[in-house]
Amino acid sequence: MTTDLSHEVEVVPAFYDIDPMEIVWHGHYVKYLEVARTALLGKFNYDYPRMRESGYGWPIVDMRLKYVRPAEFGQRLKVRAEIKEWENRLRIEYRITDALSGRKLTEASTIQVAVHMATREMQFVCPPVLWERLGVKP
């Protein structure tokens, strides 16, 4: 049996997410990714407090977004996050779609690296705690 390394959340852009062109301002998509990433890591009981307790921080060192279609005020969005790499870095891919039609709006990815909090040293191999929480092997 393989572990499902994905999770999906629904978000609805609020009025304050809209720009003068009456679409979601591009910077707010980062917030939607964060909501999905937090829920995904919470699924494995490795949310931010658990990361801190394990002695590691996981800063994002790379983020990429590709906007396909704009999202609008009040539009129900599905944000799917899936862990694609966990050996040397934590790579998560995202897909934002319209909740009703399934039409793709945005694709994105983030890369996080483990940093030992006591020494502030970047780890070149993800710590075993990540593999244990995800239920995967290196």
Image (cartoon, grey):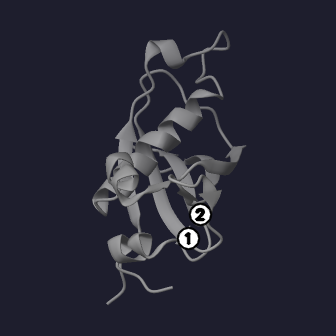
Q: Is residue 78 left or right of residue 61?
A: left
Q: Is residue 125 left or right of residue 132?
A: right
Residue 111 location in percent, x, y?
A: 63, 57
Circles 1, 2 touching at the beta carbon (< 8 Å): yes
**Mark 2 — residue?**
91
Q: Few, some or many C-alpha atoms within 10 Å of disc 1 (few <14, some 14-19, many ≥20)?
A: some
**Mark 1 — residue?**
84
Q: At 54% across and 53% down in the image, what residue appears?
A: 95
> In what quadrant of the picture does the N terminus appear?
bottom left
Q: How many marks?
A: 2
Residue 64 location in percent, x, y?
A: 71, 48
Q: At 57% across and 35% down in the image, what residue appears?
A: 29
Residue 65 location in percent, x, y?
A: 69, 45
* Residue that sits furthest to the front in the current view: 119
Q: Is residue 26 left or right of residue 40?
A: right
- Dot 1: element: strand
Residue 101 location in percent, x, y?
A: 45, 46
Relative to residue 19, is residue 53 depicted above or below? below
